[in-house]
């Protein structure tokens, strides 16, 4: 059965996208001709923050996920660069070749791939002040809503300002979020 994007609803506000698999060498005999990409929206970190829109995809062998890879774009880019363009379901997705190759390789190695966009949509660079907490919340939300991902390690890959996010800002934000959860602050 074929299905298309659905409007986000309820507290999880998720959307399913079916986008064509444009990399035939990564197809499996038993895989569908299309790939399911989840698009979720979670509330911002503070009351005045905008909602956080993120996209993620399971590995080719979903029951054998080995970790979660957050991919962080560089300046002048966005989280939709990593996913295939679809005029109907994801018109803002660019499907940049190198980014999509990274997603395919990571999924082939058993990783769940996650992307989101920085708050600075003018320059597109990551903000060291608030974006780390936003992405930590995204990763926490993903783990909380997907039982099989709870104990998986989180990895990060970033280019340009994205490398600063995954190399410094995000680990600190994840640690702070974990400590506040352990102390019952949330």
Image: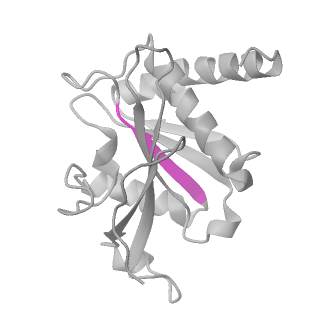
The image quadrant of residue 41 is: top left
Would you place residue 53 above or below residue 185 in this image? below
Please tell me whether the stretch drawn in magenta is mainly helix, strand or loop. strand
Q: Quadrant of the C terminus?
A: top right
Residue at the spot 23% in from the left edge and 60% down from the top edge: 85
Q: Quadrant of the N terminus?
A: bottom left
**Which one is nearer the viewer's eye here, 15 or 167?**
15
Instruction: Read off the magenta span.
Output: 111-117
Task: Tell whether position 116 is magenta.
Answer: yes
Residue 79 in the image: x percent, y percent? 34, 41
Would you place residue 9 above or below residue 170 in this image? below
Residue 75 in the image: x percent, y percent? 26, 28
Residue 83 in the image: x percent, y percent? 33, 55
- Which residue, as the protein is rendered here, is positioned at the far bottom? 29
The image quadrant of residue 142 is: top right
Residue at the spot 20% in from the left edge and 22% down from the top edge: 123
């Amino acid at each position: 059965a074929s299905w298309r994007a659905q409007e986000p609803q309820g507290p999880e506000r998720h959307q399913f996208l079916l986008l064509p698999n444009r990399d035939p060498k990564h197809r499996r005999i038993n895989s569908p001709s299309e790939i399911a990409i989840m698009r979720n929206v979670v509330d911002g970190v503070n009351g005045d923050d905008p909602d956080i829109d993120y996209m993620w995809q399971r590995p080719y062998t979903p029951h054998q996920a080995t970790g979660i890879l957050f991919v962080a774009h560089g300046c002048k880019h966005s989280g939709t660069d990593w996913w295939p363009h679809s005029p109907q379901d994801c018109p803002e997705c660019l499907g940049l070749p190198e980014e999509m190759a990274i997603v395919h390789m990571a999924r082939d190695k058993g990783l769940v791939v996650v992307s989101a966009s920085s708050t600075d949509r003018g320059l597109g660079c990551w903000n060291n002040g608030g974006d780390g907490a936003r992405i930590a919340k995204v990763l926490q939300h993903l783990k909380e809503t997907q039982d099989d991902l709870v104990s998986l390690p989180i990895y990060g890959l970033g280019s340009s300002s994205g490398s600063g996010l995954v190399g410094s800002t995000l680990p600190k934000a994840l640690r702070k979020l974990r400590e506040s959860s352990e102390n019952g602050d949330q």
